[in-house]
Amino acid sequence: MTGALGIIAGGGELPRAIAMSARAGGRVVFVLVLAGMTDEWAKEFPHESVALGELGRAMKAFKAHGCSDVTLAGKVQRPKFSEIKLDTKAMLAAPRVIAAALRGDDALLRAVVDMFEREGLRVVGAAEAAPDLIAKPGVMGRVMPNPENASDIVLAFEIARAMGEFDVGQAAIVCAGLPLAVEAAEGTDATIARVAHLPEHFRGAKGKPRGVLVKAPKPIQDGKTDLPVVGVQTVRNAHAVWLAGIAVEAGGALIVDRDAVVAEADKLGLFLVGVPR
């Protein structure tokens, strides 16, 4: 019989959404709280708190709570290695982790996955842990993209995937065929905010929304970690810089609290669409 699902929970809405979805599906859930990063919601579940670097303690906690599967979710700020206190197991793994970190975020996540799988835990992606969060193909609300939007979506996907090959980011913004922003280490919210500082003739304006935000997984990802996420705040941020809508890769992105996200997009007049790869 399948054991409990362990969630290594960073910040943001995604870890809670996965935990709630898994529990609603009848799965026992255990949350490993990363100290200083996870919100109060974790108290709703069996949980323990660990600091970055306490790998041995994390492994013991998962095994003590009967976890067979583990998923990584949420925002984790890249730490300074000089500030991390490593336990014995983490010290043994440190050379691999540091070498992977120097190759980029995706390599670092793959190294973390490998450490847990070496301990007999199966690392699963959000698509398996909480399949109801996965974006489905088609328009999700009442607003439809127009022909200019459709053309911008195609170009933005090409840009996002090309940059993803270099482990750069998962999002791109295009308006009338002009690339406006590409996500890097700053994250999606900051990427969207940059659009507001561009001259108005490059972008949308109040009453005249233009341009699209696209989110797609990096081609180098294995699907177990770090899928792109859209939540209510993403919609609000896009509206704040007068984008026309948001497109995600169907089957390759997560919609956190889908009903609320769609309702917010409808209220603000943005389209939200899942595009098959």
Image (cartoon, helix red, strand yellow):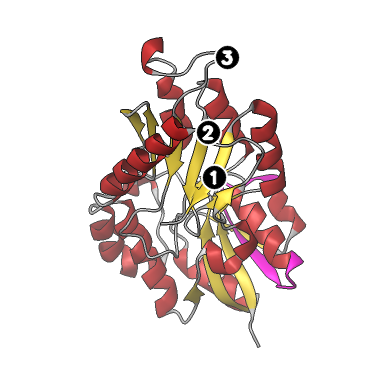
Question: x, y percentage for residue 201?
Answer: 38, 12
- Mark closest to the chain's N terminus, 2 or 1: 2
- Mark closest to the chain's N terminus, 3 or 2: 3
The residue at 45%/55% (across/down) is 226
User: Splitting the image into 4 quarters, where does residue 142 fall?
Assistant: top right
* Left or right: where 137 falls relative to 117: right
Indicate whether 143 appears above or below 23: above
Residue 9 appears in the picture as rendered: yes
Q: What element carries label 1?
A: strand
Q: Residues within 10 Å of mark 1 (few under 14, many from 20)?
A: many
Residue 186 appears in the picture as rendered: no
Q: Name the residue under label 3.
A: 207
Q: Which of 42 and 15 is in front in this view?
A: 15
Q: Name the residue under label 1.
A: 273
Number of marks in the image? 3
User: Splitting the image into 4 quarters, where does residue 112 fall?
Assistant: bottom left
User: From which residue to which does the magenta span run?
Assistant: 24-40
Magenta-colored stretch includes residue 136 = no
Instruction: Please say if the residues under marks 3 and 2 sit with CB atoms less than 8 Å apart.
Output: no
- Mark closest to the chain's N terminus, 3 or 1: 3
Q: Residue 245 carries which label?
A: 2
Q: Which of 39 and 238 is in front in this view?
A: 238
Q: Label 3 to label 1, Cα distance in Å?
A: 21 Å
Callout 1 amino acid: Val
Question: x, y percentage for residue 267?
Answer: 70, 29
Indicate whether 162 appears above or below 26: above
Q: What element carries label 2?
A: strand
Callout 2 amino acid: Gly
* Left or right: where 138 falls relative to 178: right
